[in-house]
Each structure stands twice: as structure tokens, then as C-alpha cells.
Image (cartoon, rainbow, N blue to C red):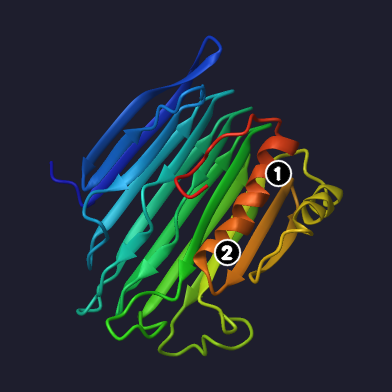
Amino acid sequence: MRSRYAGEIYLSFTRRGEQTVADRTFRRGNSRISANNAPGNETPYYFLISTGGGFTEGEQYLQDISLGESTHAILTTQAPGYIYKCENGRLTEQKFQIRIGDGACLEYYQDETIPYALARFRQRTEIELGRGSRLLLTDGLTAGWSADEQPFQYHDIGICTRVRRNGRLLLNDSLLVNPSADPMGEIGYFEGFTNYNSAVFFDESIEPETVDQMRESLADLSTESMWGLTYLDGGGALLRVMGRSLHENRRVEEAWIRYCREELCGYAPFRLRKTM
């Protein structure tokens, strides 16, 4: 039976003894799964790859990720998500379905979305957290790419992330931009910046005071990027970064992630991404 998706990934993890192992690694179409067996790392670490180098008009992609009880896995993308031009006005779409079992932890470090001129794209992420579970998730959006090197030449981009714990909605984060109609340089939009990054951390132990400590950990970081941290009811923190340099945005994001991992979770230092 032919799938309606141009690329699919089904990835699940289970606990065997003291270790987390992947018990399902299925891929179809333009999607690939590549294990990164870094020396000294006992946590499963996978790159999720789009073999086409980018998403073309009208294509749909699906990722279905499941973590069993007390597991811990790290996922990252191989490169930014390039969204090619949609000259016929058809949407390119990507869907994520993620379930994190009781006491489990998922770290998913997604690169930014880079839309080409005339691109149309929707990304929808649905995440269900179990009791005592953790989530570290990143994404972002740039001013895009066009042949004349002018920013914001794409048509419209929508990125929606919903996170629930035991059915309770903890986060409904929707970003929708339409440069043909929206004043991208004004307040409430990109405000003169070209790169936007977002990261969220859910852990039931997080309190407003924890977010204050996070702010203190970044206070001495020298950067031209602007950043802000918000406490999320139900045990969460949300980081936003705006800047003119993708590298600078990532420096802020990665410093925060290191603090969350090492100081709050007690995880050993680890080279999480190719850019760190």
C-alpha cells in the first residue's frame, strides 16, 4: 500500500536492564535514521535525516516517536529544514507524534527551518508526557533564502507545538508568519532580526525560582542576540532568542541547554550537536 507521506520515521525505545535501547527503527521514503555511537555515551543518540536535502512543494512528512517508561534518548536533525518554493501554492507539511512514558526523558534538538522564496509550510507537533517525564525540545525559523538575498521572501510558515501531561495542556505554542501581509520588521514580528530560535524544557520539579536561576546562568553571556525566559505552569521553561546571527542564537540556546542538562538534570557533559 502506497503511503501518502514522502518520508516516515517510526522510532521507539524501551528499557532493558540498566540501559535504553531502540526496539523499533522503521523508516520509509525520503527519511533516514542514523545512529551516532559517540565514545563514552550510554544514551541512545540518533540523527533523523531527510535524504532529499529539503522538502518540496506538496510533500508530507511524519515522525512517530515513543519512549517507554524510564528511558532516555537523544535525537537531532542532520541539517536545517529547507523548504523549497511552492509556485503552485500547495502546502508542504511535517507532523510529529511524540509520547514520553513515565520517568522517561527525550532530548530532541531540531535545527531551524529555512524557507526558500515562495515557500509554504506547516509543522505540527503533538507531545504527550507521562508522570515524572522530561522533555528538551528546540526549533527555529530564519528569514529564509532567495536568489536576490532579500529576507522574508517566503509566502507563509506555520509552526505549532502542543505539549500535554496526562491529558492536561501545558503548552500551545503557535507561530504563523506571512511576510506578504505581515510587517516582519515591526514589534511582535522579527523586529529587525533575521533569526528566531525557541527551546522548551519540561520537568515537574521546575518552579518560578528555577527559571530565575536559569536567567542568572545566562546573565554573563556576551551576545548581540536578545533572549527571554518564561516559566510555564505545570513545570516548564520556555526560551526565546532573536538575533541577526544564527551562530549567536545557538550559543545562547546551547548555554541554556547545558545548564538544564548538567545542573538541573545531573547529566554528564556531552557533545550534543555538530555545532557545539
Residue 169 visible in the picture: no
Which marked residue is nearer to the observer: mark 1 or mark 2? Answer: 2
Q: Quadrant of the N terminus?
A: top left
Residue tagged by mark 2?
248
- SS for callout 1: helix
From the viewer's side, name the closer residue of 40 and 161: 40
Residue farthest along the right direction in this orientation: 209
On the rendered structure, is 204 left or right of 73?
A: right
List x then y, in percent, for residue 28. Answer: 22, 40
Residue tagged by mark 1?
259
Residue farthest along the top direction in this orientation: 17
Instruction: Answer whether labels 1 and 2 touch (C-beta < 8 Å).
Output: no
- The amino acid type, in three-letter code, at marker 1 is Tyr
Q: Is residue 272 above or below residue 126?
A: above
On the rendered structure, is 81 left or right of 28?
A: right
Residue at 21% from the left image edge and 48% from the top image edge: 30
Residue at 64% from the left image edge and 85% from the top image edge: 187
Q: Is residue 177 above or below residue 158?
A: below
Which picture quadrant has residue 70? Answer: top right
List x then y, in percent, for residue 102. Answer: 61, 28
